[in-house]
Image (spheres, coloured by chain):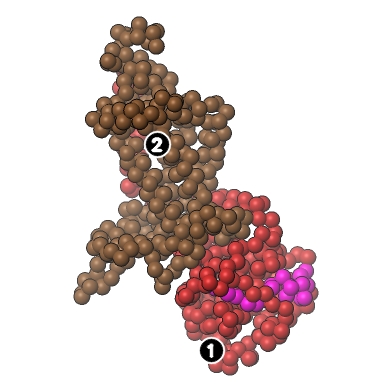
Amino acid sequence: MSRLVTRRRFLIGSTLTASALGLSGCDALVESDRTKSVLKIAEGFSMKAQRFLQGDNALAREFSEADLSPVFRSNGTSMPDNPQYLDWMSQQFSTWRLDIGGLVEKPAQLSLAQLKAMPSRTQITRHDCVEGWSAIGKWTGLPLGALLQSVGLKPEARYIVFHCADEYEKSLDGTGWYYESIDLVDAFHPQTILAYSMNGRNLEVAHGAPLRLRVERQLGYKHAKYLTRIEAVADLGRLYGGNGGFWEDRGYEWYAGI
Amino acid sequence: MATIDARAKTGRMHIYRHSLAVRLSHWVNVLCLTVLLFSGLQIFNAHPALYWGQYGADNDPSFLSLEAVEDGNQVKGLTHVGSLSFDTTGVLGLSNVDGEATARGFPSWLTLPSYQDLSTGRHWHFFFAWLFVLNGLAYLLYGLISRHFRRDLAPAGNELTLAHLTHEVANHARLRFPKGAEARHYNTLQKLTYLVVIFLLLPLMVATGLTMSPGFDAVAPWLLDIFGGRQSARTLHFLTAFSLVAFVVVHVAMVILSGVFNNLRSMITGYYAIRQGDEQ
């Protein structure tokens, strides 16, 4: 009998402790740096597991015209307010150039007309926002892999960084400029394209005109809009917050495949 | 049976009911499902609407949504289910955050963390999703190798007759729970419920969760065909989560009604007390 009482006391005691922890300690526990670093293990698992199962070339589902979203929602910036961008826009992007540099053999500046003259790929794919909604659109653009091959990557290049024309969060130190990065597996994936057309028309400003990234096996925030510069780098630590992207610097996963 | 009857007058005896593997995986599941539910509601709050099909965003018809709308100089929380709307001010759509009425799907006391923070909710969700999956795989392996499934969960032929099931349902309704030798093993309703949870609901949670992943869709596009699209999978993920909540509510109620300390002890130490004299 005494054993039972001991157990009963233990159970009551542990239940009370657990509920007190739940009430007051939850947010404190959530905010601790140690907790965050432990939870980050899951991102590594997800990436390794998906990459192992995907191989390099498993394709995202492609849909038919009948599946297109009647209204494709735009998210994030819908109209960049930077004077340089407004100037490009007023001239129908005829003076806009895509700058390709960093760890490449032959840096280049390409006009929209030059990009459109390159071999293209059209795909109807699903855009998955990290918030939970999805939209299906038809995209035409040039495969990023072909562009990277034409400029030649230096052997030490590990990531491709996308610099954008929108300052999504106004900040004094410039850390609010939108940027993104992907590794070479995604950069050379057949469905990774630099899109200049959506649903059969020139890309609208709200969707990233004149050029945006489509990296179909990842979530929406990886699909950088308003591209101005592509940079090949060996590591991501020196850029902005050091996590490889605007949302990544604000706590979101760099590997956004889930 | 004869031995048990012969010892009937000795009163209480403890039988070893739950193996260590079952107890461990049970409590790891309690932890995982708790965190997964509350962090899942945090994730849901980032876009509190559910759709059916391959796509779904604000302009598409949703069959469930939570929103805050202005009504004169007041703000109301509304829950829409199909074409029906319910005023759920204070709980769904609009609730109190630090003393202020705030547009919010589920209220802050139901989300992890309590404040709106999608990225943190996701970090918790995926960490505990991994733990949940690894725990589940270990349990499945154990259940097969140790014959736990066959021995403890598979109903015997005579348990599945209509007469037997009706009898058990009637007893449950009158809160008359098995005693004595009958309490040595799960009753048929328990067996069937646990089988549905273990082999249907929990795998459905994992599969519908993976279907929402653009990366995993490239690995297994057939998941999209099974569930009719990413947004259907998201909806089923939500509905299955609430089926599990319903299961837990009934499960805990049964634990309390049929002897909370005896049940808790058996799930912690493995030993369950049965009274021999009580039967018949």
Chain B: drawing colour: brown
Q: Are marks 2 and 1 in contact (CB under 8 Å)?
A: no
| Residue at the outermost top position | B6
- In the picture, residue B77 is in which quadrant? bottom left
Expressed as whole percent of the image width and height from the top left, the position of residue B53 reads: 47, 63
Q: Is residue A128 left or right of residue B42?
A: right
| Image height of B64 relative to B254, above or below | below
- A152 magenta-colored: yes
- B106 magenta-colored: no
Expressed as whole percent of the image width and height from the top left, the position of residue A209 reads: 57, 82
Q: Residue at x 58, y 93 (%)?
A: A91
Which stretch appears magenta? Answer: A136-154
Expressed as whole percent of the image width and height from the top left, the position of residue A118 reads: 72, 81
Closer to us: A67 or B47: A67
Q: Residue at x 33, y 58 (%)?
A: B106
| Residue at the outermost bottom position | A91
- In the picture, residue B248 is in which quadrant? top left
Q: Which mark is residue B193?
A: 2
Q: Amino acid at mark 1?
A: Leu
Q: Chain of mark 1?
A: A
Q: Is residue B222 left or right of residue A118?
A: left
Which residue lies under the disc numbered 1? Answer: A86
Numbered disc 1: secondary structure? helix
Q: Residues within 10 Å of mark 1 (few under 14, many from 20)?
A: some
Q: Which mark is residue B56?
A: none
Residue B261 appearing in the image: no
Closer to us: B183 or A86: B183
Q: Amino acid at mark 2?
A: Thr
Q: Chain of mark 2?
A: B
Q: Which chain is red?
A: A
Q: Residue at x 33, y 17 (%)?
A: B180
Q: Is residue B154 left or right of residue B141?
A: left
